[in-house]
Amino acid sequence: LYEAELERAHGQMLEEMQAMEDEKNRAIEEAFSRAQVEMRAVHENLAGVRTNLLTLQPALRTLTNDYNSLKRQVRDFPLLLQETLRSARSEIGQAIEEVNSANRELLRKYRRELQLRKKCHNELVRLKGNIRVFGRVRPITKEDGVGAEAASAVTFDADDDAVLHLSHKGKQVSFELDKVFPPKATQEDVFREVQALVTSCIDGYNVCIFAYGQTGAGKTYTMEGTAANPGINQRALRLLFAEVRGKAADWDYAISVSVAEIYNEALRDLLGKEPQEKLEIKLCPDGSRQLYVPGLTEFRVQSVEDINKVFELGHVNRATECTNLNERSSRSHALLIVTVRGLDRSTGLRTAGKLNLVDLAGSERVGRSGAEGSRLREAQHINKSLSALGDVIYALRSRQGHVPFRNSKLTYLLQDSLSGDSKTLMMVQVSPAEKNSSETLCSLKFAERVRSVELGPVSRKAELGSWPSQEQLE
Ligand code: ADP
Ligand code: MG
């Protein structure tokens, strides 16, 4: 039994030992396979890391390269910048030089064109004659009255604006001038025809515009006009301002005006402090043979307000000088003298032109009607100075060697604006009324004779005879 028990216990022990052995083997196997799995995972990780490393290496290499080249560039940058700046500077300099030379060339061409324009302008004026004669017929007014006396004695030619016909004592007389303005012509129409003359004084020419005619024929209306409808004086100054402003980029201009009156052969300054003082006309002491009037006031004008002030002062002085302004103004010559001085800033060239706007004394024949005393003296002075003006224009147009400038104050004063390449316009004013027809005839005869003098070679002058005096004209 014991032995059997031992046997069984031994068997049991063996069994248990076997079971434990199995258990141990299984646990070992399990641990082994787990370790194997982990090992594999580690291996795989390692492989991943290795491939990562492999791909990182070239990236690092290019980064290093980039870094190095950047470092080089940064080191070279200031040099490069300097080089670029230098070349840009020289390119800009060259471009500026090119523009400059183009500008110089343009300026040269511009100056040549300017000279050419002046030459063409002169040629045009020469062809038309430096002395032009226009006629202006004023409308019939209330003052002309009513009935036959106030009927119009003047008719026009529909096809020719240089011709007008006057019926006088039952006969028709025709006159040809350079241009005739009928009553319906406006102040603008008249100014349009004279504005080229006005602007030429900017180029340094001397210009005279005269209004001639009997009292009441419209001289003052044409020259001064009314506030609402200004005449040549005001329009000329406005135009000069505008022209001068247009040239301000290259030129400096100064415009100044004097206002004077010639009454009984005495010259008076209407802008001066002593308008009653008689002024003398003198030769410049510098030997230039230019004339000047010591003491004649010159006002610098820059705007329309300035000229209005100047005209106002002139009127006030003229009115305080006499008892009846209307009478006085019909018996004296009123002068507005505009001087335009220019300086071309680029060349230093200087120009000086004078525009003389003259409202002449009435041309009616007062002397005939048995006037006496001061009235006769006035009439004689007017006759003398108007014939002197006719003589001078005649001598100039027929190119005579001697021009009798000194025969009157007016022609003497205007000598340098009537001679040489100066330009003159005679605006002959007439009244169309029947009752004025004999004065109108006289004025138109004056106009036609001034105009009809041939501009020919000097040798022809002997054939032309002499200019008739004012008395002969009458
Ligand atoms: P003058 O100065 O020759 O003596 P005015 O200029 O004083 O003559 O003219 C006389 C009158 O005729 C004025 O009342 C003026 O207004 C008028 N008159 C002259 N010309 C014209 C015209 N073209 N249109 C309208 N009215 C005019
Ligand atoms: Mg007048």
Image (spheres, grey):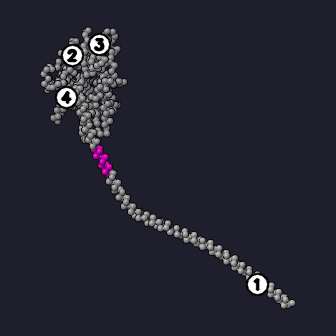
Q: Quadrant of the N terminus?
A: bottom right
From where the camera sits, is residue 468 visible? yes
Q: Where is residue 427 shown, x and y percent of the image?
A: 26, 22
Quick one: label 1 or label 2, which is nearer the N terminus?
A: 1
Q: Nearer the viewer, mark 4 or mark 3?
A: 3
Callout 2: SS: helix
Marks 2 and 3, Cα distance to the nearest angstrom? Answer: 30 Å
Quick one: label 2 or label 4, which is nearer the N terminus?
A: 2
- Residues in magenta, as a range: 93-104
| Numbered label attached to residue 153 | 3
* Amino acid at dot 4: Ser
**Image quadrant assignment for residue 184:** top left
For the point 28% across and 33% down, the residue is 255
* Amino acid at dot 2: Leu
For the point 20% across and 19% down, the residue is 449
In this orientation, which residue lies closer to the viewer: 220 or 461?
A: 461
* Residue labelled with disc 4: 419
For the point 17% across and 24% down, the residue is 456
Quick one: label 2 or label 3, which is nearer the N terminus?
A: 3
Callout 1: SS: helix
Callout 3: SS: loop
Q: Nearer the viewer, mark 4 or mark 1?
A: 1
Marks 3 and 1, Cα distance to the nearest angstrom? Answer: 169 Å
